[in-house]
Image (cartoon, rainbow, N blue to C red):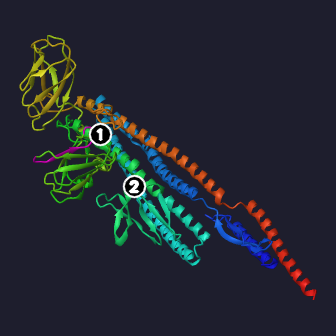
């Protein structure tokens, strides 16, 4: 090869470098573009007797500057950043709601119990009773508002996930199409890679990682397989598999995500997904939305149940025993009143029902309950992920007891169950939506005790401290006759028909009144033998039962505000340790703490993503100053090669002219 051919090789090589550099400069702002460089190598030399003579240069490759490790790291941080951003955005909205003194429960609950105390302070006032009913309705409206807000978030999440799944499908389809184009190019070029197509594919894969956490595996033919979850393939070679959303078969307010499989099969992969915006929504739903909605519902159920129980132990201004103050959904009927407390997933036998809920023991968890043989049951606590196995106590009815700290919060009647029956229990989810005030007339507020206590014979120092009905049987009021309690010692006790009752100063005694219920009586001091106290119907001068002027049941109702009647999930105590106020404060603190942690994590992931972008850009990015310098250098080399060709032509002309 002569000087002409050598010059031509240089001309071609430096022209390619100039073209590639120009391509880099033109794509400086193209999303996902990776800087390309032309690799050069010497052509094989010509051997002569005096040594090897070089034959110029050849183009060995045109490669893009790329680092797979940095790209994988960027995708991981992109996925985590999107996850935490979505989680924090929604969690902060919940935290702001429950902590808001105007929109949250704190102010409404305080106003309600202040009104109860006002009735206790002035039980004869009709206006205080009307204010109580008004504030009770305000509290109920607040429960409704909070439930509606949280359900609105649930609807918003479902709608957003449908959009995100559509975006993910679009990206997966684009990856599969690009795989096909790349495969065709590789097969037709003897194994060379189409750099611009690789960039486009990497960009789309990164966008997919913003939807959900993914992993990739590159194949020998240039295609990339993309997996999500626990290895579910969303792109395999030139085929993409479609994601979809579907309504949960049992929980109609809950969306599941499915993935198309081979042979037209569809698999639910909701529990396997994580990361990205989709993962952030699923995590928010499981860690914030469901527990918060359940906690608000538990407060409505607990307050309503305990207030109802105490209210029914009092007597109203009409002389009747109190009725239920609040309406609560009927948990004893599956889906009673639209409660969706007990959802049937699969039932081949007699449908189960909830026979009892101990609100003091109840936590905020939902449960999946199933049986493989109709006798032994598996209970999954959705909140903790802990699974337990229990056997129903044979009846009839056959009772399965589980849930709460001591595993006794929920009692299910599973009589007639058969193999593979399964249920989902959401004991508190919608109570905040369903609770209502049932009392419409202030006269029906049962502020009084239905039984009065008066002193009879008194030679000792004993005096009544407090009293009130503990349980009730509304069959007999007024009492058939007064009941006389007579003190005797030893042992210290009060004798009465159906007694005796052991006495300790300052401790409540339980007096069983036939046909009415159990009556609690606390006496302080030292009674003398023969001292008496008389229990009788709380009545007017004509003997008619009436609750005017008596506030003893109202005091017990007011005490519920601070009484430790509910379990606090953050403690390990076996007995209820929290009041309604404490419980709500704990909820505010827990959601607030998770939101603050989400903010910290979101900021951290954003910084890590930014650092990953910078690190990758240092490798693949186009530096205009550097490219401009290369342009000058390659131009000079190109011009020098052209000069070599001119010299070759001149030598050839000189040779011709010599003849």
Q: Decide whether the magenta segment is chiefly helix, strand or loop.
A: loop
Disc number for residue 29: none
Q: Residue 117's spot in the image, x, y percent?
A: 32, 31
Left or right of residue 311: residue 178? right
* Magenta span includes 572: no
Residue tagged by mark 1?
303
Q: Residue furthest bottom?
A: 659
Residue placed most toward the observer, 646 or 470: 646
Q: Which residue is drawn at 32% across and 38% down?
A: 132
The quadrant of the image that shows the N terminus is bottom right
- Residue 141 in sight in this render: no
How many numbered circles are shown?
2
Q: Residue furthest front?
A: 49
Q: Residue 556's spot in the image, x, y percent?
A: 26, 30
What element does badge 2 sit on?
Answer: helix
Q: Is residue 366 above or below residue 546?
A: below
Q: Is residue 51 above or below residue 397?
A: below
Q: Which residue is drawn at 36% across and 34% down?
A: 582
Residue tagged by mark 2?
154
Label 1 vs label 2, nearer the camera: 2
Q: Residue 549's spot in the image, x, y percent?
A: 23, 29
Please rate how many residues cluster around mark 2, counting C-alpha atoms within 10 Å: few if below 14, some from 14 to 19, many from 20. Answer: many
Residue placed most toward the observer, 175 or 466: 175
The quadrant of the image that shows the C terminus is bottom right
Stretch of the chain drawn in magenta: 395-406
Q: Are marks 1 and 2 in contact (CB under 8 Å)?
A: no
- Tell me the distance, in whole angstroms, between the alpha carbons under discs 1 and 2: 25 Å
* Magenta span includes 402: yes
Left or right of residue 185: residue 92? left
């Amino acid at each position: 090869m002569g000087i002409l051919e050598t010059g031509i090789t240089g001309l071609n090589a430096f022209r390619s470098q100039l073209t590639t550099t120009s391509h880099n400069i033109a794509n400086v702002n193209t999303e996902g573009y990776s800087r390309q460089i032309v690799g050069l190598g010497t052509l094989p030399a010509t051997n002569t007797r005096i040594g090897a003579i070089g034959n110029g240069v050849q183009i060995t490759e045109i490669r893009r500057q790329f680092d797979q490790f940095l790209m994988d790291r960027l995708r991981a941080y992109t996925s985590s950043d999107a996850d935490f951003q979505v989680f924090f955005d929604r969690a902060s909205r919940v935290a702001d709601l429950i902590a808001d003194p105007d929109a949250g429960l704190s102010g409404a609950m305080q106003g309600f119990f202040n009104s109860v105390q006002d009735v206790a302070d002035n039980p004869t006032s009709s206006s205080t009773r009307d204010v109580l009913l008004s504030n009770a309705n305000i509290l109920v409206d607040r429960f409704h508002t909070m439930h509606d807000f949280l359900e609105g978030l649930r609807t918003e999440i479902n709608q957003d996930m449908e959009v995100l799944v559509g975006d993910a499908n679009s990206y997966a389809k684009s990856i599969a199409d690009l795989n096909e184009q790349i495969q065709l190019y590789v097969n037709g070029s003897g194994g060379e890679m189409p750099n611009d197509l690789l960039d486009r594919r990497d960009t789309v894969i990164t966008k997919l990682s913003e939807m959900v956490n993914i992993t990739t595996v590159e194949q020998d033919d240039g295609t990339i397989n993309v997996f999500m979850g626990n290895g579910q393939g969303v792109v395999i070679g030139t085929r993409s598999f479609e994601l979809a959303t579907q309504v949960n078969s049992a929980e109609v307010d809950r969306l599941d995500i499915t993935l198309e499989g081979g042979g037209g099969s569809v698999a639910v992969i909701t529990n396997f997904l994580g990361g990205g915006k989709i993962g952030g929504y699923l995590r928010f739903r499981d860690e914030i939305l469901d527990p918060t909605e359940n906690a608000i519902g538990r407060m409505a159920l607990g307050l309503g149940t305990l207030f109802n129980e105490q209210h029914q132990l009092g007597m109203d201004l009409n002389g009747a025993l109190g009725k239920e103050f609040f309406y609560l959904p009927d948990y004893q009927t599956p889906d009673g009143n639209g409660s969706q407390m007990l959802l049937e997933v699969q039932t081949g036998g007699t449908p189960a029902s909830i026979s009892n809920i101990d609100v003091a023991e109840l936590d905020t968890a939902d449960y999946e309950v199933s049986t493989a043989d109709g006798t032994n049951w598996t209970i999954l606590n959705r909140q903790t992920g802990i699974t337990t196995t229990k056997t129903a106590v044979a009846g009839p009815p056959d009772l399965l007891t589980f849930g709460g700290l001591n595993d006794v919060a929920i009692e299910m009647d599973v009589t007639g169950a058969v193999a593979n029956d399964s249920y989902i229990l959401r004991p508190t989810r919608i109570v905040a939506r369903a609770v209502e005030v049932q009392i419409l007339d202030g006269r029906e507020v049962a502020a009084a005790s239905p039984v009065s206590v008066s002193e009879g014979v008194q030679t000792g120092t004993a005096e009544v401290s407090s009293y009130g009905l503990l349980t009730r049987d509304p069959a007999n009021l007024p009492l058939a006759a007064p009941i006389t309690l007579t003190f005797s010692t030893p042992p210290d006790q009060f004798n009465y028909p159906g007694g005796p009752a052991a006495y300790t100063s300052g401790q409540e005694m339980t007096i069983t009144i036939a046909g009415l219920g159990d009556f609690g009586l606390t006496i302080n001091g030292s009674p003398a033998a023969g001292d008496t106290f008389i229990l009788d119907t709380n009545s007017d001068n004509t003997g008619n039962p009436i609750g005017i002027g008596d506030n003893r049941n109202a005091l017990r109702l007011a005490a519920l505000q601070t009484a430790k009647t509910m379990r606090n999930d953050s403690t390990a105590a076996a007995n209820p340790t929290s009041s309604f106020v404490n419980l709500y404060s704990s909820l505010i603190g827990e959601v607030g703490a998770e939101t603050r942690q989400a903010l910290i994590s979101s900021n951290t992931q954003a910084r890590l993503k930014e650092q990953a972008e910078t690190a990758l850009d240092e490798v693949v990015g186009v530096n205009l100053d550097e490219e401009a310098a290369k342009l000058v250098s390659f131009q000079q080399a190109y011009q020098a090669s052209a000069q070599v060709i001119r010299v070759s032509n001149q030598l050839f002309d000189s040779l011709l002219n010599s003849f």
